[in-house]
Image (cartoon, coloured by chain):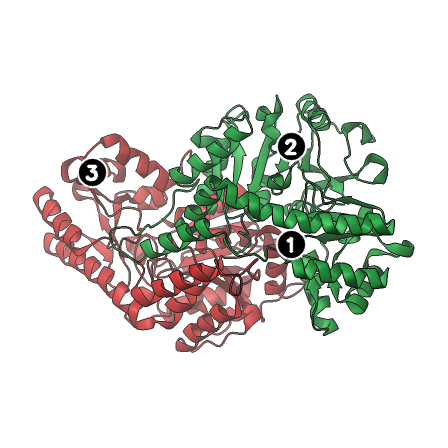
Chain colours: A green, B red
Amino acid sequence: MLLSKNYLFTEIEERVKKCGKKDIINLGIGDAVRPVPKKINRSYVNSAKQMGAKSTFKGYPPISGYQFIKEGVKKRYKRFGVSLSDEEIFISDGAKTDLYALLSLFSTSTALIHNPSYPAYADANLIYGNRIEFIKSCRQNCFLPKPCDLKENYGNGYLIYICSPDNPTGVVYDKNALKLWVDYALNTGSVIIFDSAYADYIRGDYPKSIFELKGAESCAVEVASLSKTANFTGVRCGFTVIKNQFTTDLDKLNNLFKRLKSATFNGVPFVSQKAGESALINVGECLKNTDYYLENAKMMRAFFNDKGIFAVGGENSPYLFFECPCRLKSFDFFDILLNKAGIVATPGVGFGSGGEGFMRISGFNFRKQITEAINRMDGLF
Amino acid sequence: MLLSKNYLFTEIEERVKKCGKKDIINLGIGDAVRPVPKKINRSYVNSAKQMGAKSTFKGYPPISGYQFIKEGVKKRYKRFGVSLSDEEIFISDGAKTDLYALLSLFSTSTALIHNPSYPAYADANLIYGNRIEFIKSCRQNCFLPKPCDLKENYGNGYLIYICSPDNPTGVVYDKNALKLWVDYALNTGSVIIFDSAYADYIRGDYPKSIFELKGAESCAVEVASLSKTANFTGVRCGFTVIKNQFTTDLDKLNNLFKRLKSATFNGVPFVSQKAGESALINVGECLKNTDYYLENAKMMRAFFNDKGIFAVGGENSPYLFFECPCRLKSFDFFDILLNKAGIVATPGVGFGSGGEGFMRISGFNFRKQITEAINRMDGLF
C-alpha cells in the first residue's frame, strides 16, 4: 500500500480552488468557524500579555504540560468517573501530532484500522513503515465493527484504532461494544489507540473516555483534543492520557512517552495551555458551543430523513455520513454537489475504500449557511 | 548505543530540584528570560484578540504556514543574499520537532554527529532506529570538525548534522570550512541538516544560512528557530527551509515533507505565526535582544580569559564552552558549581563523551545574575 499523493483535505482544497465558484458553503474539512468562547479567549489574551512583561514571561514549557492545565484535565475526567494523576497526562498541540508520535513506542507494527476512518491513522502508519489491516465499517455492522468482524486473530497483537464518536461516520460505541474491544486487546496483547476528539458531542449514554471501561488502563492510550470542543482548531491544544497501569518490559509506557517527547518536542505554548485550562473548566461555554454545531447536524439529519436518504451520525457527533443518491460514486457526487449546489462535503472514499458511495457532511458552519445548504440540496435531490 | 534514561535537561532539572539550594543562578538550559519584545508582543496579543471575534477568527492554519509569515522569512533570507519561494518554507513550532520529523524523509540511515553536540540529534536518531557515527569536536580541531577528520568515507552517505554557531561550544563555521562540508555532501550523496537556531548571534563575517554556500540547495535542509532571537522559547515558532533544487527519485524533497507534515501535524497556531512575522520584520528589536545576551556572554568570556581558563564561544554565540578547573570531570564540577556557588551550568559530557572535562555556560540571564555569577565564580576558582 502506498501513501496517496495528497493528504485528503489538501486534495479537496485544491479541487475547490480549481472550480472557481463563489458563495461556496464548506461543510467539508470540519473546521470550527465560531470564535473562541468569551471567557476562554480572555485567558488567551491575558496570557499573551503576560509573555510581554518581565515578571510574568514564560520560557520553555514543561514537556508534558503545565500543572494548571493538568488540573483541568483531571477535573474533566472526574466528570466521567476516571481519576488521573499528573504523570498520566501529556498536553499536546492537538491529536494528530501525538497519533504519529505514539508509533515510536510500540514494537507492534500492524495497525488495525476501520475502513473508512480518519486518514491520518493509515497515513501515519504508512509513513512509519507499519503493516495495516483494515476492518470493514459498513451498513451491515452499523459502522461499529466488533472483534467478531475480524476474519482471523492476528498473532502478535494490533494497534487498534478506535474513534468514538467516529470520524467520518458520526456513530458512537456504547459501553458493551467497547468492552468487547478492551477484552480483545487484553487477550491478544493489542494496544487500543482511542481517539476521543469528538467526545464532547455525546449527549446519550455512551462512554466519553475509554478509561470508563475496566481493563483499558493497561492496554489503551487516549488521544484527545479541544479543537472541536472550544473552536481550538487554530489554537492547537489537546492531551494524551496513558495510565500508570500500562507497563512494558522496559518501563511504564508513560515514562517512555515522556522520554520520547523530551527528545522530539519542546512543549505547547503557554498561551495555548492557558486557553486550554479555561476550556476545560468553563464547561458551560463549551456545551453552548457544541450544542450549536449539534443543532446544525440535527437539521441536516432531519433533511436526509425527509428525503429518504440513508444517513448515520449527527446525533452525538457533528458529522453525518450519508449515501450518495442514484448510487453515485463519492467523488462524482462531490463534483455535482460542488458545481451544482456550491456545497463542499467530503467524499467517503477519501476515508478508505469502504466509504465509497458515501459522503461526510459536517455541522461546522453558521446556522445561516446550514439552512442555505439544506435549501440548495432540496433543489438538487 | 542506548538512549540515556533521561533527556539531558530533564536530568539537570532533577539534580537542581534535589539540591534544595535557594538563590540559584541558572546558566544551564539556555532558556530565554527576557520578555517578548514590545512590538512583537503587541502582534501576539492582538492576534489572540482576533481569535475571539467572529470576523477575525482563524481555524486550522495552513500546514506549512500562513503567507504573511512566509513573507517575513523571505525578507530575512534576502538579507543573507538567499532568495526563497513559498513552497520552500515550512513554519514549525520550533527546531526540535522538525529535527525529528525530517528523519522520515531519508533512506540514509547513518547519522554523522559532532561529539559533543545538542543531544536531540542523537536522541532522535536513536528513537528512529538509525545508526550513528560520531565525529570528534575538540580542542585540536577548534571544535570545528572538517571532512578530513573523518576516519573513512562511509559508503552510503550520511545525515550530517551541523549547528553553527554551535551548541554547546559556541564556535562558528566560516564560509571556507562550511564549503568543505557542502562539497563532501555532494560528493558522497550525504544530506546536511543545518541547525541555524543561533544565527542571529553572529556578528562577524560568517554564514547565517547554509544556503549562502553554492551547492547547498541540492543537499541541505535548514532548521531555524526564533526561540533565541526574540525570546520565543515559550511562544514556539521556527521554520525549516528545503530548496526546490533538493530532489529525490520520488519527488522534490519539499513536496515529500509537505505530504509528511500534512499527515502528522496540524500547523502552528495563528498567534505564534503572527508573533513570528513580527519578529522577522522588527529586526532592530531582535538585535537589541541578542546584543544583551551577547554582552553577558562576553563578560563571562573576559572572566575566563582573566583567570587563564580555556574557553571557546561567547563571541558569536550566547554559549561558552570552558574547561573544568583541576582536570575535574564535568558532572563533578557541575556539583561543585551548584553546591558551592549556586550556579547551574551544563556538564559538557551531557552533550557526548567528547565534552567530558568541559562545561557549557550560557548568557541567557539578566545582567544582574551574570555579574553575580561572575563574582561567585571569582570566589570559587
Q: Residue at x 24, y 65 (%)?
A: B291
Q: Nearer the viewer, mark 3 or mark 1?
A: 1
Q: Residue at x 32, y 42 (%)?
A: B349
Q: Quadrant of residue A170?
A: top right
Q: Which mark is residue A192?
A: 2
Q: Residue furthest right?
A: A326
- The reply, left or right, for residue B259 in relation to residue A71 is right
Mark 1 residue element: loop
Name the residue beneath numbered marker 1: A364
How many neighbours does mark 1 have within 10 angstroms: few (below 14), some (14-19), or many (20 or more)?
Answer: many
Instruction: State whether residue A301 is above or below residue B237.
Output: above
Q: Amino acid at mark 3?
A: Leu
Q: Residue furthest left?
A: B379
The answer for which chain carries disc 1 is A
Q: Which mark is residue B338?
A: 3
CA distance for labels 3 and 2: 45 Å
The answer for which chain carries disc 2 is A
Residues tagged 2 and 1 counted as in contact (Cβ below 8 A): no
Mark 3 residue element: helix
